[in-house]
Image: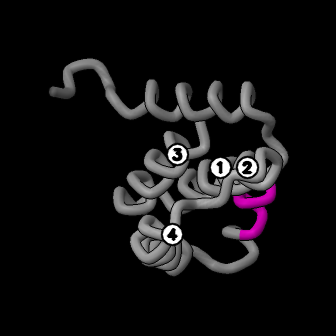
Amino acid sequence: LALCLEGLGRTWGVAGRPAVAAQLLGAAAALREAQGSPLHPAERAAYDRDLAAARAQIDEPTWAAAWAQGRALDGVAASAYARAVVAGTQEPGDA
């Protein structure tokens, strides 16, 4: 689940939605910590690059608040949040 949340978070960061990215990435970080499952070293550089890019799009207090909101989610809530975010990305008539 953490890997999926990271992928979605990184995607939303690139898409210019840094607060959503922070919530998803914060949730993923908390899940990884709780499970004792750190990010694979081969993924670290790309993750850090995408995290920094998303973080640079908003001010630090906003990022920190969104990150904390994500960290507060358990796996079920994080999954539900991710599904809701994805469901809201396609408006009727969009291809």
Do the CB atoms of the residues marked 1 and 3 lie less than 8 Å apart? yes
Which residue is tagged 1?
Answer: 28
- 2 or 1: mark nearer the eye: 1
Quadrant of the rendering where the C terminus is positioned: top left
User: Closer to the N terminus: mark 4 or mark 1?
Assistant: 1
The kind of residue tagged 2 is: Gly
User: Closer to the N terminus: mark 2 or mark 1?
Assistant: 1
Which region of the structure is painted magenta?
64-69
Do the CB atoms of the residues marked 3 and 2 lie less than 8 Å apart? no
User: Closer to the N terminus: mark 2 or mark 4?
Assistant: 4
Which residue is tagged 3?
Answer: 3
Which residue is tagged 4?
Answer: 41
Q: Residue furthest left?
A: 95
Q: Can I make out residue 69 in this image? A: no
Report how far apart the C-alphas of labels 4 and 3 lie in the structure: 13 Å
Which residue is tagged 2?
Answer: 70
